């Protein structure tokens, strides 16, 4: 069970429901990220995302396969996949208490903003039914509560206890691409 954020392109005036329905009809694997001008732009965006993600999360593994660019942060379980016209972030509901707050406030949100900024895709949080751009400090306790509720029901993996209280390398994490 994972918390997820979806990223896609919406047409002007298109509702999130319509955009998400349209995305469900497509197969992202059919959109080869390596082809054409769009592939070059996506590769350039990926090359901007990775250093920001490393500054935010610390050590990450990256892979680019035919259909997607992938990033994995083993310590938290955060996974980012970027396709030609979509992207997604998933994170297991393993964190609890202050670790859940840290994960959401200092890692998940900033990574989502990095993906939006560098790809031009719009992020959507299906758990909250809200756009990433609409997230405010008031939404964070709701997200943390979702982690608490889901993680209380989920079995703990002793090999992956979830993120600790550290915000990553160098102390509190920030979105390195945003003004501080």
Image (spheres, rainbow, N blue to C red):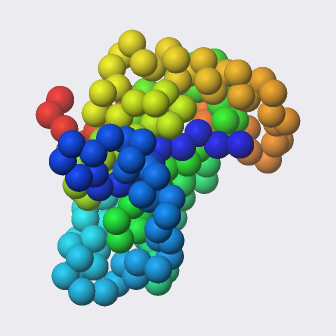
Identify the residue at horizontal 40%, vertical 30% (top origin). Answer: 130
- Is 16 rendered above or below residue 82? above
Residue sitting nearer the eye, 77 or 5: 5
- Is 116 rendered above or below residue 43? above
Residue 149 visible in the current orientation:
yes
- Is 178 rendered above or below residue 21? above
On-image quarter of the C terminus: top left
Identify the residue at horizontal 32%, vertical 41% (top origin). Answer: 15
Q: Residue 9 location in percent, x, y?
A: 29, 55
- Is 31 rendered above or below residue 17? below
Give the residue furthest to the bottom.
35
Identify the residue at horizontal 65%, vertical 31% (top origin). Answer: 95
Q: Residue 171 location in percent, x, y?
A: 39, 31
Residue sitting nearer the eye, 126 or 90: 126
Identify the residue at horizontal 50%, vertical 37% (top origin). Answer: 126
On-image quarter of the N terminus: top right
Residue 110 visible in the current orientation:
no
Give the side of residue 161 with respect to residue 164, left or right: right
Q: Residue 23 location in percent, x, y?
A: 44, 59
Give the residue furthest to the left.
179
Tally the marks: 0
Q: Residue 127 location in percent, x, y?
A: 54, 32
Give the side of residue 73 with respect to residue 160, left or right: left
């Amino acid at each position: 069970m994972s918390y997820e954020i979806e990223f896609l392109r919406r047409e002007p005036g298109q509702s999130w429901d319509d955009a998400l329905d349209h995305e469900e009809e497509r197969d992202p694997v059919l959109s080869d990220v390596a082809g054409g001008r769009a592939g070059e732009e996506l590769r350039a965006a990926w090359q901007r995302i990775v250093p920001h993600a490393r500054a935010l999360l610390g050590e990450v593994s990256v892979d680019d396969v035919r259909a997607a660019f992938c990033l994995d942060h083993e310590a938290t379980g955060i996974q980012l996949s970027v396709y030609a016209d979509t992207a997604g972030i998933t994170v297991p509901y393993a964190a609890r208490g202050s670790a859940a707050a840290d994960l959401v406030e200092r890692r998940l949100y900033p990574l989502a903003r990095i993906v939006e900024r560098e790809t031009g895709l719009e992020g959507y949080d299906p758990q909250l039914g809200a756009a990433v751009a609409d997230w405010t400090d008031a939404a964070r306790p709701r997200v943390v509560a979702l982690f608490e509720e889901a993680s209380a029901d989920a079995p703990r993996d002793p090999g992956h206890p979830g993120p600790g209280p550290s915000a990553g390398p160098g102390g509190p994490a920030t979105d390195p691409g945003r003004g501080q």
